[in-house]
């Protein structure tokens, strides 16, 4: 049973055309995270929500925004994708903060043409 | 400054033998450590974790060892199977403030288990 679901699995967009990636969870976890992963590098945290409290990483570009309308859903909006934004985008959840295991979705691979 | 390092980008092991994946960290505030496995085009899958109050945790074929004095942890897979071929990431969390709640990932080690 899928616990962290990401749609779509593959997304193609055009340079500069806004795109939204979605994530949903059935775990009822308080925290949801968005990561960017390029090639086989370590996942890079973009931001996270603790319930409705949004926390942006200091080096996350303004081009990346997020919304969490309810506990189950979280969206990643890329306002003007550049070629350098092509990557795998991973959503993860944890029950709480601090020493908690994070559970990842399958990821959305974004291609920017 | 990489706080979590996996110095071996790849490892090749024969089926049935032991796989040992290593991870070093520099932040003495880390107190919770995890291993994730990642297949191509999929998200990381949680494998096993260990808190700093332990030095060993075992789950089936997977055992994680933590050496706090050396700031080193390792993942042992015995016996290794071809289906274990994947990229393995170690991750750590702990410390003060909001940053302590986040996971810091190593760069990953690609394990190849040959039949």
Image: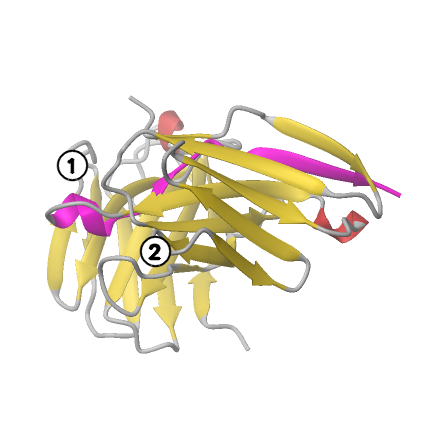
Count the labels in the image: 2
Q: Is residue B25 above or below residue A78?
A: above
Chain containing mark 2: B
- Quarter of the figure that contains the N terminus of chain A: bottom right
Report helix, strand or loop for mark 1: loop
Q: Which residue is mark 2?
A: B53
Q: Nearer the viewer, residue A27 or B75?
A: B75
Q: Is residue B105 magenta?
A: yes
Q: Quadrant of residue A85?
A: top left
Coloured how?
secondary structure
Q: Which residue is mark 1?
A: A62
Which residue is rendered at x = 18% and y = 45% of the image? Answer: B95
Looking at the picture, how far across and down is residue A38, in whole percent?
Answer: 45, 33
| Residue at the extreme front | B69
Magenta region, residue range: B98-115
B6 relative to A92 in the view: left or right: right
Q: Is residue B21 above or below residue A54?
A: above
Which residue is rendered at x = 19% and y = 31% of the image? Answer: A59
Q: Is residue A1 above or below residue B95?
A: below
A25 relative to A74 in the view: left or right: right
Looking at the picture, how far across and down is residue B70, in whole percent?
Answer: 40, 31
Measure how far apart labels 1 and 2 are at the Cα level. Answer: 39 Å
Which residue is rendered at x = 57% and y = 45% of the image? Answer: B75
Q: Is residue A37 magenta?
A: no
Q: Nearer the viewer, residue A15 or A95?
A: A95
Report helix, strand or loop for mark 2: loop
Residue A10 visible at all:
no
Chain containing mark 1: A
Residue A73 visible at all:
yes
A82 relative to A67 in the view: left or right: right
Which residue is rendered at x = 37% and y = 61% of the image? Answer: A101
């Amino acid at each position: 049973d899928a616990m962290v679901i990401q749609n779509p699995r593959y997304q193609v967009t055009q340079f500069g055309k806004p795109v939204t990636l979605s994530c949903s969870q059935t775990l009822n976890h308080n925290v949801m995270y968005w990561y960017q992963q390029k090639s086989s590098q370590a996942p890079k945290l973009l931001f996270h929500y603790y319930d409705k409290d949004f926390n942006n990483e200091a080096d996350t570009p303004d081009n990346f925004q997020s919304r969490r309308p309810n506990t189950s859903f979280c969206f990643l909006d890329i306002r003007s994708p550049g070629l350098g934004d092509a990557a795998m985008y991973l959503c993860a959840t944890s029950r709480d903060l601090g020493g908690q295991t994070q559970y990842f979705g399958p990821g959305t691979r974004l291609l920017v043409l | 400054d990489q706080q979590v390092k996996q110095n071996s980008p790849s490892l090749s092991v024969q089926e049935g033998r032991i796989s040992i994946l290593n991870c070093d960290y520099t932040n003495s505030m880390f107190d919770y450590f995890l291993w994730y496995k990642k297949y191509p085009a999929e998200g990381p899958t949680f494998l096993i974790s260990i808190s700093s109050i332990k030095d060993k945790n075992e789950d089936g074929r997977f055992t994680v060892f933590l050496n706090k004095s050396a700031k080193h942890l390792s993942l042992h897979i015995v016996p290794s199977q071809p289906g274990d071929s994947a990229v393995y990431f170690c991750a750590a969390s702990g410390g003060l403030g909001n940053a302590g709640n986040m996971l810091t990932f190593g760069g990953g080690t690609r394990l190849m288990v040959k039949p």
